[in-house]
Image: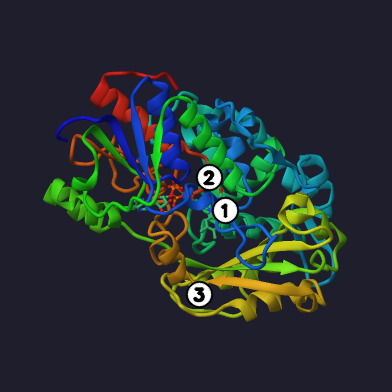
Amino acid sequence: MGNTEFDAVIVGSGPNGLAAGITLQQAGLSVLIVEAKSSIGGGMRSAELTLPGYLHDVCSAIHPMALLSPFFAALPLDKFGLEMIQPTLAAAHPLDDGTAAVLDQSIVHTALRLGADEGAYLDLMGPLVETLPGLLPELLGPLRWPSQPVSLAKFGLKALPSAWATGKRFKTKAAAGLWAGMAAHAIQPLENIATSAFAIMLMAAAHLKGWPIPKGGSQSIADALASYFSSLGGKIETGFEVSSLTQLPGSKVVLMDVTPKQLLRIAGDRLTASYRARLENYRHGPGVFKVDWALDEPIPFTAADCRKAGTVHLGNTLEEIAQYERNVAKGIQGEKPFVLVAQQSLFDSSRAPEGKHTAWAYCHVPNGSKVDMTGEIESQIERFAPGFRDIIKAKHTMNAAEMEGYNPNYIGGDINGGIQDIFQLYSRPVLSISPYRTSARDIYLCSSSTPPGGGVHGMCGYHAARQALKDVFKIIIEK
Ligand SMILES: Cc1cc2nc3c(=O)[nH]c(=O)nc-3n(C[C@H](O)[C@H](O)[C@H](O)COP(=O)(O)OP(=O)(O)OC[C@H]3O[C@@H](n4cnc5c(N)ncnc54)[C@H](O)[C@@H]3O)c2cc1C
């Protein structure tokens, strides 16, 4: 690309853009990251959205995937200011009878609380918790020949069924509901094949590493990654929105932390017609509607365990959650949404003035929806925490269309950079030996629209950078 001022330029400073930058800079290259917004971080920004002194996570809040990430684990992020806090309980799932199922860091405690399903939970999760660490490098990367085929096959036998089928094997409402709430992170009908994989990953993550929140907000992860990148000599420029590659300084390679739709807009003229056609077939999933509150008190959940959990899933039973997610996938806005709530200020006093609190929540909605779900979300919280509405001081909302306005990577409010069903789980954005390559030899895709997909883990950026190092610079980094 013309004169080469940098070895590599990266467009976008989300977790994957930063991870790609770090990987290339660690290999001795000179790297510039350009970011459209005035602050770095993509889905890791935190801001005072409601009132002064109340710090909210604009997008991501809870970080099991960051702790599972082999890439992040190898970085000295603690030395660059990152402190992860483990809530007393990873997650809680209240039921209409006032009780709650819990996801504890201890698999035994989690199982014990499930009564008649204690054995079923241990049978399902026990072997997976043992084998998952060894499988992580493969599960969190592109499809390749497995190094542990037997363990992977055993994992696949449990991950491939639908969450609906596996959930129906539990006898209690508590176990089935807890399972359904975890699987609903897939943002697709729970009857879909391989939706069990989402519940398994999240539950195993809790038992292996917990579901932490970063002290000072998710922005602290972005800041730690950026500081480390800068310490290696990397450069970052904010307020630089790229609409054409001609705006960029010369480099040997460009890595794009964007979705296929944006890639087509920005660099379509550099791609072959057949690759463009394949990108145009890429599919997005439902969007999200998000609310942040400044509160006078912690959410007054009836079930005491919900007041000890970093995350609370509101949807009652497997059937209720499945019904809501099924409708959303069909483009129907149902009532009684499945709501994901995070209570960061319970565990991190830096989020709100003394004695005050914040809460974060979202529900899934049809892609591109402009429907205001504030009332429905608050009613679901009120259902399990009577009196919630009385403690609200201020709120900030974003519908699915506004989500895309905030970050163009969230097409129609899709927070995973494309639906993660079985057809797009690893073949994202296209089925290829290396999905990070595009048809142009000097342009790579490094966002969550590549394997392993959504979440703050940096593995898409890491794998894209590894591929670019190998192809363009003939540098091979092991694992
Ligand atoms: C409401 C919500 C809740 C979430 N909760 C969690 C959670 O709790 N835990 C979790 O792990 N994940 C969560 N996620 C998902 C997570 O945030 C994303 O999967 C992750 O941020 C994707 O990373 P990325 O680097 O691929 O893209 P992004 O983080 O989206 O970053 C892309 C960056 O590129 C920039 N950019 C785009 N186009 C251009 C351009 N043309 N020029 C210059 N810059 C550009 C954008 O401004 C942005 O900064 C959540 C997301 C949302 C929205």
Residue at 78% x, 67% y is 95
Q: Is mark 2 within 8 Å of ligand 1?
A: yes
For the residue marked with disc 3, what is the amino acid? Asn
Mark 1 residue type: Ser
Q: Earlier in the sequence, mark 2 or mark 1?
A: 1
Q: Which mark is residue 259?
A: none
Choose top left, top right, bottom left or bottom right for residue 343.
bottom right
CB at mark 3 closer than 8 A to ligand 1? Answer: no
In the rendered structure, are the residues bearing label 2 and label 1 in contact, judged by CB atoms less than 8 Å apart? yes
Q: Which mark is residue 60?
A: 1
Q: How many marks?
A: 3
Q: CA distance from mark 3 to mark 2?
A: 27 Å
Residue at the image point whose x is 69% and y is 44% from the top:
215
Q: Is mark 1 within 8 Å of ligand 1?
A: yes
* Secondary structure at numbered mark 2: loop
Residue 51, given in percent of the width and then of the height, sits at 67, 67
Distance from disc 2 to disc 1, alpha carbons, whole Å, reads: 8 Å
Quarter holding the C terminus?
Answer: top left
Label 1, residues with CA under 10 Å away: few <14, some 14-19, many ≥20: many
Coloration mode: rainbow
Residue 313 % position (x, y)? 69, 62
Instruction: Answer with mark 3 or mark 1, whichever residue precedes in sequence.
Output: 1
Image coords of residue 15 (percent x, y): 48, 42
Q: Is residue 387 above or below residue 340?
A: below
Say left or right for 154 vs 82.
left
Q: Which mark is residue 456?
A: 2
380 in relation to 222, above or below: below
Q: CA distance from mark 3 to mark 1?
A: 24 Å
Could you tell me which residue is drawn at 16 percent across and 35 percent down? 1
Q: Nearer the viewer, residue 50 or 95?
A: 50
